[in-house]
Image (tube, helix red, strand yellow):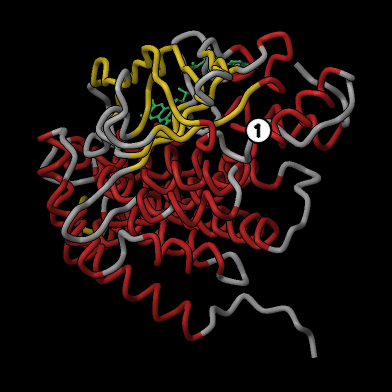
Amino acid sequence: MSGFSLDLNEDQLQIQKWVHDFSETVIRPAGHEWDEREETPWSIIEEAAKVGLYSFDFISQAFFDESGLLMPIAAEEMSWGDAGIALAILGSTLGLAGIAANGTPEQLMEWGPQCFGTPDKIQLAAFAVSEPDAGSDVSSLRTRAVYDEATDEWVINGTKTWITNGGIADVHVVVASVDPDLSARGQASFIVPPGTKGLSQGQKFQKMGIRASHTAEVVLDDVRVPGHLLLGGKEHLDERLARAREGRRSSSQAAMKTFEASRPTVGAQALGIARAAYEYALEYAKERKAFGRAIIENQSIAFKLADMKTRIDASRLLIWRASWMGRNGKEFTSGEGSMSKLYAGETAVYVTEEAIQIMGGYGYIREHPVERWHRDSKIFTIFEGTSEIQRLIIARAISGVHVK
Ligand SMILES: Cc1cc2nc3c(=O)[nH]c(=O)nc-3n(C[C@H](O)[C@H](O)[C@H](O)COP(=O)(O)OP(=O)(O)OC[C@H]3O[C@@H](n4cnc5c(N)ncnc54)[C@H](O)[C@@H]3O)c2cc1C
């Protein structure tokens, strides 16, 4: 008998249903309101915390699921409800991923729970890499961290931009250069704890979509953090820098490690939007009459839906494969993590646009959610590595050529 199966186990099915029910009853009905308000939906995050969905425990359970599928399943269901609110709930997970990817187990156990707080005292986390002059090009970060030996503190200066939960987070995980001569290999990550002097929010951005998720600049002005808040510890950093100076291969860069781990989950968020729009358009196409028949009876409409569904299912398979590989320690030899995020992101943009087309004028107005879903979908070809950068990673992985 073959050991291969795509069936979810009982636990996974139960959690999928639990997240879906929350998404259907709490997230989806609130989507329009928070898109219009363009504010962090604290009340919804609180509800998610009360049921245990917004918690370190749940995210740990999802991360440790042996198949690796629990996290993308939960992300798909949340985003199916509303991608902006889903990101408001999941944003802290990126900060947590930054700690998990680069920190010691002790740092993870101390700071992981603080990324979420408790239902009575919600806390948020942020992962701050991007800068005004360093988005795709993570190697040119200008934010500097300098070690002050006298006080055993790191002093961080710089400006981060486009940061999810930036400035409103309790725990900021900041990637900074400790040795600019080494470019990306001279970077390290730091935890900046709640209330640290010198960290402030710059401008909050007004966005096209995912407007319930807070995106802002983070200004770091002589921010001092104790030595033990360097993720991975000083000894490990010194060894890594020494290897880099000698031109030897060192473990991958701080920011890249985090993004590799989180890409399939980001793809799953895009997938949730695509599925929502497909389901909505399918129902509509069966109901809507033109020329005396349901519009779905026209091949041009039915074929759109066939293509939409095919690409949605292909996205899910790529996401599940990458998640399973990541969890089971398989190396992404063909950029499989990037493939999943690339394909799901572009599918979400395509499916939501086709959904608008299927609905005609009704697709274009705010009475129906598909125009919002289309706006929400576009970010998935931009953040956590643009589509171009994902193609670059895949192209380099499959060819061994340093494609530019
Ligand atoms: C809503 C939102 C939330 C975000 N959240 C976070 C966050 O929490 N933390 C964080 O650190 N960052 C975050 N970001 C930043 C995001 O990751 C960057 O915007 C993204 O990486 C692209 O960087 P950039 O905007 O500087 O574009 P650029 O790097 O300037 O790219 C511009 C264009 O050039 C293309 N391009 C660049 N280099 C190449 C190349 N070598 N080959 C081919 N094409 C290329 C890009 O694909 C893109 O089309 C967020 C951004 C947004 C909009």
Q: What is the residue that sits farthest to the bottom in this orientation? A: 1
Expressed as whole percent of the image width and height from the top left, the position of residue 26 reads 17, 62
**Which of the 4 image quarters holds residue 402?**
top right
Crowd rating for badge 1 (residues with CA inside 10 Å; few <14, some 14–19, many 20+): some
- 264 vs 105, nearest the viewer: 105
Expressed as whole percent of the image width and height from the top left, the position of residue 72 reads 49, 59
The answer to whether residue 116 is left or right of residue 365 is right
Reply above or below: 280 against 234: below
Quadrant of the frame with the N terminus = bottom right
Q: Residue at x 28, y 27 (%)?
A: 167
Amino acid carrying label 1: it is: Lys
Reply above or below: 208 against 24: above
The answer to whether residue 203 is left or right of residue 105 is left
Residue 16 visible? The answer is yes
Q: Residue at x 30, y 36 (%)?
A: 194
Expressed as whole percent of the image width and height from the top left, the position of residue 52 reads 29, 68
- 285 vs 225, nearest the viewer: 225
The answer to whether residue 1 is left or right of residue 144 is right
Reply above or below: 20 against 335: below
The answer to whether residue 135 is left or right of residue 171 is right
Q: What is the residue that sits farthest to the front in this orientation? A: 150
Q: Which residue is mark 1?
A: 234
Reply above or below: 111 against 161: below
Q: In the image, is the residue at mark 1 within 8 Å of ligand 1 by its beta carbon?
A: no
Marker count (numbered): 1
Q: Residue at x 47, y 77 (%)?
A: 12
Secondary structure, mark 1, is helix
**Which of the 4 image quarters holds residue 342?**
top right
Quadrant of the frame with the C terminus = top right
Expressed as whole percent of the image width and height from the top left, the position of residue 8 reads 54, 78
